[in-house]
Amino acid sequence: MIKYRYLLDFNSDNLETEYHDVLIIGSGIAGVYTALEIPEKYDVAILTKETIDISNSVLAQGGIAVSLDKEDSPELHLKDTLYAGAGLCDEDAVWVLVNEAASNIECLCEYGVNFDRKNSQELSLTREGAHSKNRIIHAGDTTGKEVCDKLISGVKNRANVKIKERTFAIDLLTENGECRGLLAYDEDTSRYKIYLSNVVICATGGIGQIYKNTTNPEVATGDGICLAYRAGAELMDLEFIQFHPTVLYHPENKSFLISEAVRGEGALLRNINGERFMPKYHELNELAPRDVVSRAIFEEMKRTGSSHVYLDITFKGKDYLENRFPNIYKTCLGYGIDMSKDYIPVSPAEHYSMGGIRADVYGGTNIKGFYACGEAACNGIHGANRLASNSLLEGLVFGHKIGNAVDNILQDNEKTGVSVIVNTDRVPNDIDAEKLIKEVQEIMTQYVGIIRNKEGLLHAKAEIKKISDTITDMRNSKIKHFELQNVVLLAGIVIEFALEREESRGAHYRSDFPCTDDINWRTHIIKSAPSVR
Ligand code: SIN
């Protein structure tokens, strides 16, 4: 699937070089929290391809799952996570997630995060899909922003953490199968640069930009997963893509999330004719697991020949909605939708990748010196479908574990050196990267979306290969070109995973294999790249 090990021809000996004890790629919750959890004696650099405040995490609305209520427990949180994960979660990893949730939330409060409270002692808890208890803590409907703002100001105050904005990580540098650092492009100086380190942590977040409609920001082109793959890292579970059921469907905006918390507060789903339909699909109705709700919406849209359904919370008063969901209320109003009076048009859009770089709970991968956490990683906590509001939590719990492991990893640390020379016969080109990315998004949306089958997947594979063939030998120089290479590579990988899993499970639904097959398929698919020059 890949011809060249590196996206760029270069000679590391001729490039400016910078050394850090730890390199973190990505500035979402996983990246920034990990940086804060690393002992201050270590010199850490966070590389982020835009500004530090642009990430998927910042856009997270609903909240963070944690069993704080006296009726609740980590055991119940575990049970709900396993149920949503449809038999594919790694139970040991989920134990870590649910048991270490509360201590990390305490830590967030110490960093100054202001969650909504019932009173001065207790945090407010709401419910989301497939949770058996109210256990979602939140900060209005902009939880991710509140958390990230506080964590970002934390890292800005840490003398040992350097923030490198507009720095695009192109490829990992490996020698003898070990990671020694990475090659990056600095947009401000238009220069390539070598970053050396014995610990590189990938926290680059999601892959939403391989689809046409996604709640992810534009930066979510899966660069971390692709650089890991080219370096030989194992990937896992990438057939499982979560489509959030309720994303605004408006001619001017098809990416704004209408949080599941709105359904948690009682909102109903209605089809284009105004009929409520969830009771006929699942006993948990609007609060069924996300994959179930998204498929039900998809079916209703197909049945009624419509491009969207409606979310109805008109039975709640304006004051209540403005107060509980200030951001959603204001944004909808901006499009002429007053959610206290009007149904909100919604349809599913890509939201989260359950799969990613195969990692253990300390972020360790099969490449020495290379670690992964957050959405870019896959340690099996989500199985085939992530439980709502487990994602910010994942960034915290496993960021904390890696941060704390760094002391051990860096014992007897010696500064790395590396010499990599890449010289291929790639040629300059005038390819329209944006146009080709759009083509990939169309293909993935049409054939590798909520419902898949062999015929469609094979067609998608052939179409992606055609695009891949036109760009493989091009000489890359701009970030858009690197992103195009990554989007095409990742699309091909997701298709391979989806073709291989001949059953339906969680977020992966095959109309040609509509049943779950526990005999042959209760297992993860793992793939790594064949070695290339
Ligand atoms: C939401 O607010 O619906 C998103 C929360 C999540 O993805 O877990």
Image (cartoon, helix red, strand yellow):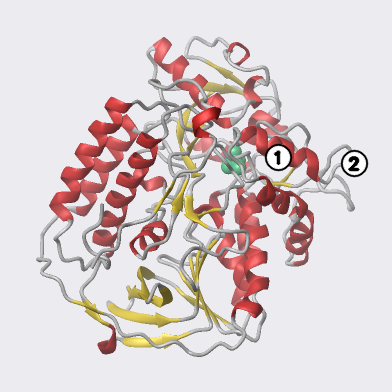
Residue beneath label 1, please?
323
Q: Residue at x 69, y 20 (%)?
A: 315
* Three-letter amino acid code of the residue under disc 1: Asn
Mark toward the viewer: 2 or 1: 2
Residue beneath label 2, please?
70
Query: Helix, strand, or loop for circle 2?
Result: loop
Q: Position of residue 533 (x, y in %)?
A: 23, 68
Q: Position of residue 254 (x, y in %)?
A: 42, 36
**Closer-to-camera residue (456/155):** 456
- Label 2, residues with CA under 10 Å away: few <14, some 14-19, many ≥20: few
Tally the numbered discs.
2
Query: Helix, strand, or loop for circle 1?
Result: helix
Q: Position of residue 401 (x, y in %)?
A: 67, 65
CA distance separating discs 2 and 1: 26 Å
* Three-letter amino acid code of the residue under disc 2: Lys
Find residue 228 and report its image quarter. Answer: bottom left
Task: Name which of mark 2 and mark 1 comes first in the sequence.
Answer: 2
Above or below, 417 relative to 277: below
Tell me whether circle 2 and circle 1 mark residues in contact (CB < 8 Å).
no
Asked if the beta carbon under badge 1 is closer than 8 A to the nearest atom of ligand 1, the reply is no
Q: Residue at x 43, y 74 (%)?
A: 179
**Closer-to-camera residue (205/172):** 172
In the rendering, which numbered label is found on residue 451?
Answer: none
Asked if the beta carbon under badge 2 is closer than 8 A to the nearest atom of ligand 1, the reply is no
